Image (cartoon, helix red, strand yellow):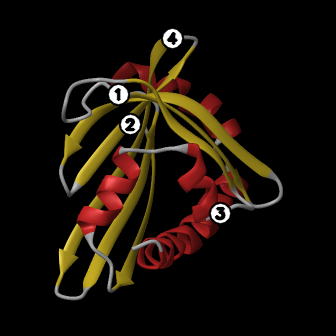
Amino acid sequence: MIKHKVEIIVKNALAEQFYEFMINPNDKKYNEWWAEEHLQFHITKKGDENHLGDCVYFDEYLGAKRRLKFHAFITVADKPEKIVWQMKMAGIKMPFYVILGLKNKEDELYVSHELKLGYTGIGSIFDPFIRLYFNKSFRKALENHCNIEWYKLADYLGASE
């Protein structure tokens, strides 16, 4: 299994605000958050009242050379601390996860953005093929993106109140 984690601290931000924004996505607000990079993020099919099972579509640039787009569904919705999206391809659940962790401490928000890609056990023989796509350049682009976007979200949410 391939793991990639970016952790940052955002001053004067609230887990509840970030959580609500990410659990209830819509293209307009997603694009306003970062117009140059964020294209689409919306619910395509509703799950339960807590958003478990919600299906989403996600499309963004990671700098000038990378684009990340996928369909996923929510497997964990632990308000306000954690959301897990599992990616799908052609309607098939894939062993690819985006995990967003949010934790407030005093006037700071700890944000953890993690990708888990691939299989454990015998299935890990496929990891080298996954690494062809999720290579060092891709990881760097994702890290740069994350190190900008969460501060931008705090600014956007503060401005939109």
Which residue is depicted at the point 55% across and 68% down? 149
Q: Earlier in the sequence, mark 1 or mark 2?
A: 1
- Residue 122 falls in image quadrant: top left
Q: Earlier in the sequence, mark 1 or mark 3?
A: 1
Q: Earlier in the sequence, mark 3 or mark 2?
A: 2
Amino acid type of the residue that numbered disc 2 sits on in the rendered structure: Trp
Residue 10 at what x, y percent from top left? 38, 81
Q: Which mark is residue 85?
A: 2
Residue 60 at what x, y percent from top left? 66, 48
- Residue 127 falls in image quadrant: top right
Quadrant containing the N terminus in the rendered view: top left
How would you rate the neighbour count of disc 2 (Cα within 10 Å): few for under 14, some for 14-19, many for 20 or more? Answer: many
Quadrant containing the C terminus in the rendered view: bottom left
Q: Earlier in the sequence, mark 3 or mark 4?
A: 4
Which residue is depicted at the point 51% across and 37% down? 42
Q: Nearer the viewer, residue 1 or 79?
A: 79
Amino acid type of the residue that numbered disc 4 sits on in the rendered structure: Gly
Q: Nearer the viewer, residue 141 or 75?
A: 75
Residue under label 1: 54
Residue under label 3: 140
Q: CA distance from mark 1 to mark 3?
A: 29 Å
Amino acid type of the residue that numbered disc 1 sits on in the rendered structure: Asp
Placement of 130 over or under 37, stated as above or below = above
Amino acid type of the residue that numbered disc 3 sits on in the rendered structure: Lys
